[in-house]
Image (cartoon, rainbow, N blue to C red):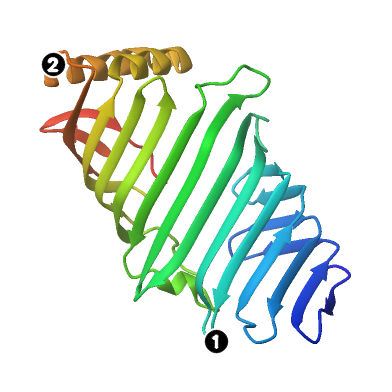
């Protein structure tokens, strides 16, 4: 916290920095951000409001760097002696540029609004996140897909310890289980995908679960994905034919999918393979 200053007395406690820097040697991450401003009422020091200015730079030993910018980023948190009880963060006009350090491939993501929320629920961890009208493009090419709005509401079982002051220095999401109450992806023009069900991540990063999936605008999804991923058109066409047969030619329907170590099964028919996290 460069040029740290503490003030706000007698009614508040506030900390400001001209620059915020993070070095996490355990996970191989380093980051720098712009000025930080925070404040808490003197009678409720565990309830902190803070704002952070851009730009942000994140570098990882995994071989990528991330450049971030936003017009507004603010957050609130409630903390006790052992760690966080809950926290929320909201960003306006968020832009992220992800660059691979080997090869130089870049992915640009823009979202006019993004927010995330976490809270303890006994020993479990509740998570919720939302983005609106997110646009992704590769290098200087046009956007890969139409603007996409997404939201997720889920619980990670036994992971409230992530909010402890000491934190969890182990395997992160690896070896975890949870429940997706509702995940929605909306690409406009009637293209809506909804997923719910239990999920687990193995210690090798492979995803398993049993999901109830509802899809609307199947033809529109098919057309958008074929245009965005021309190298995968055969796979996309095969999936569309399966859905067409399953839903008797209707443009919407619902199904139960099983995922076992990354292999997606519709009944006993494998239809896709998910990469490890």
**x, y percent for residue 37:** 77, 65
Residue occupying the point 62% across, 44% down = 63
Give SS at disc 1. loop
Q: Is residue 128 above or below residue 222?
A: below
Say left or right for 13 vs 243. right
| Residue at horizontal 67 percent and vertical 39 percent from the top | 93
Marks 1,2: beta carbons within 8 A: no
Q: Position of residue 98 (x, y in %)?
A: 64, 37
Q: Is residue 261 visible?
A: no
Label 2 sits on a secondary structure element that is helix
Residue 28 sits in quarter: bottom right
Mark 2 highlights which residue? Answer: 245
Q: Residue at x 63, y 51 (%)?
A: 61
| Residue that sits furthest to the front in the current view | 11
| Mark before the other along the chain sequence, 1 or 2 | 1
Q: Mark 1 points at which residue?
A: 81
Tell me what residue is drawn at x 36 percent, y 39 percent: 184
Mark 1 to mark 2 CA distance (whole Å): 57 Å
> Which of the two residues, 210 or 259, is positioned nearer the viewer here?
210
């Amino acid at each position: 916290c460069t040029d740290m200053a503490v003030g706000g007395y007698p009614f508040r406690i506030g900390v400001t920095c001209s620059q915020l820097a993070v070095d996490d040697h355990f996970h191989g991450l380093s980051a720098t951000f712009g000025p930080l401003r925070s404040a808490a009422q003197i009678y409720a020091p565990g309830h902190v409001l803070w704002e952070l200015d851009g730009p942000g730079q994140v570098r990882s030993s995994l071989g990528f760097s991330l450049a971030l910018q936003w017009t507004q980023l603010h957050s609130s948190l409630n903390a006790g002696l052992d760690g966080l009880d809950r926290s929320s963060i909201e960003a306006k006009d968020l832009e992220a540029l992800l660059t691979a350090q080997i090869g130089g491939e870049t992915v640009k993501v823009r979202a006019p609004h993004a927010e995330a929320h976490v809270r303890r629920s006994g020993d479990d961890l509740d998570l919720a996140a939302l983005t609106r009208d997110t646009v992704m493009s590769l290098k200087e090419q046009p956007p890969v897909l139409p603007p996409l709005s997404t939201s997720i509401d889920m619980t990670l079982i036994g992971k409230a310890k992530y909010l402890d002051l000491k934190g969890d220095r182990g395997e992160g999401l690896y070896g975890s289980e949870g429940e997706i109450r509702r995940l929605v992806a909306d690409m406009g023009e009637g293209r809506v995908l909804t997923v719910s069900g239990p999920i687990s991540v193995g210690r090798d990063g492979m995803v398993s679960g049993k999901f109830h999936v509802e899809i609307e605008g199947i033809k529109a999804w098919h057309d958008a994905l074929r245009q965005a991923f021309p190298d995968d058109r055969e796979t996309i066409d095969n999936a569309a034919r399966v859905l067409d047969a399953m839903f008797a030619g209707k443009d919407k329907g619902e199904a139960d999918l099983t995922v076992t170590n990354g292999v997606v099964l519709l009944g006993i028919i494998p239809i896709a393979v998910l990469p490890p996290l």
